[in-house]
Image: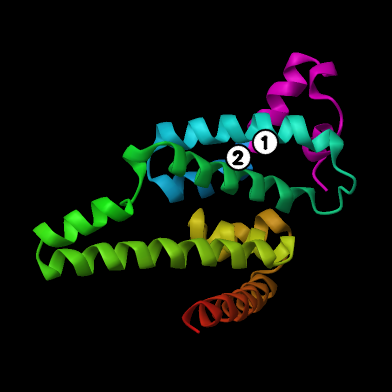
Amino acid sequence: MERWLLFLRDNIHHLDSSTQQSVYYSYKKLIYRDIYLLFHNHELAEDVVQESFLKVMMKAPKLRHSNNLKAWVKKVARNTAYDYLKKNQKYYLLSHSRLIRYLEHHSQADVVLVDSHIESKICYEMLYESLDQLNTRYQDVIRLYYLENKTCRVIANELEMSEQALIQLLYRARKKLYTHFSRKWGMRLK
């Protein structure tokens, strides 16, 4: 477990300011990319990161088990983002009544565009849920390769493994992600 996660278990107010900053920046590094990809807006992502950090600080010391703290932290951040979407109507996709008015005044092509946008948001959410179900090693490899766009050689050097071993690990991670995602997506279609 990463050291900064252990600090969340304690009362963060008792830590010196440089340690508090370090914990926050480590938290932000873990969470920001996922939240930004959800909103595609830097300011909103920053707000959600800060708000979710406050929630984590308040609730983490009260947790009974800390064996999967990283996944819990990500879940709190994602739920905070969804709450933020609900609270701030100007960032809604479309409310039900607005959707009906939209459908009445726009062409079928526009409706298909809205449908595909909603579908892609759902797909994206399920993909991230599936990614969170993978073990940490698989998550790290997939994030480094796909989200940070690092080459296999760079990732292999960072993880101190051979490039061939990394390629095999990435293959297994993708296969496992595909299995988790397919189950979720298949259940949604039923």
Q: Residue at x 85, y 42 (%)?
A: 63
Residue 140: image quadrant is: bottom right
Q: Report the label total.
A: 2
The amino acid on which the numbered mark 1 sits, given as a three-letter code, is Ser
Q: Residue furthest right?
A: 64
Disc 2 from disc 1: Cα separation: 5 Å
Whole-percent x and y of residue 146?
Answer: 50, 62
The amino acid on which the numbered mark 2 sits, given as a three-letter code, is Lys
Report the span colored magenta.
Answer: 1-27
Q: Nearer the viewer, residue 170 or 56?
A: 56
Q: Nearer the viewer, residue 23 or 60?
A: 60
Q: Residue at x 30, y 52 (%)?
A: 94
Residue 102 sits above or below residue 41 on the image: below
Q: Residue at x 64, y 73 (%)?
A: 173
Question: Label 1 near label 2: C-beta < 8 Å?
Answer: yes
Q: Nearer the viewer, residue 109 or 9?
A: 109
Q: Which mark is residue 26?
A: 1
Is residue 12 toward the left or the right of residue 80 in the image?
A: right
Q: Which residue is mark 2?
A: 29
Residue 162 sits above or below residue 27 on the image: below
Q: Residue at x 35, y 46 (%)?
A: 92
Residue 135: image quadrant is: bottom right
Whole-percent x and y of residue 155?
Answer: 61, 59
Q: Of helix, strand and loop, which one carries label 1?
A: helix
Q: Is residue 19 magenta?
A: yes
Residue 85 sits above or below residue 144 on the image: above
Q: Residue furthest front?
A: 97
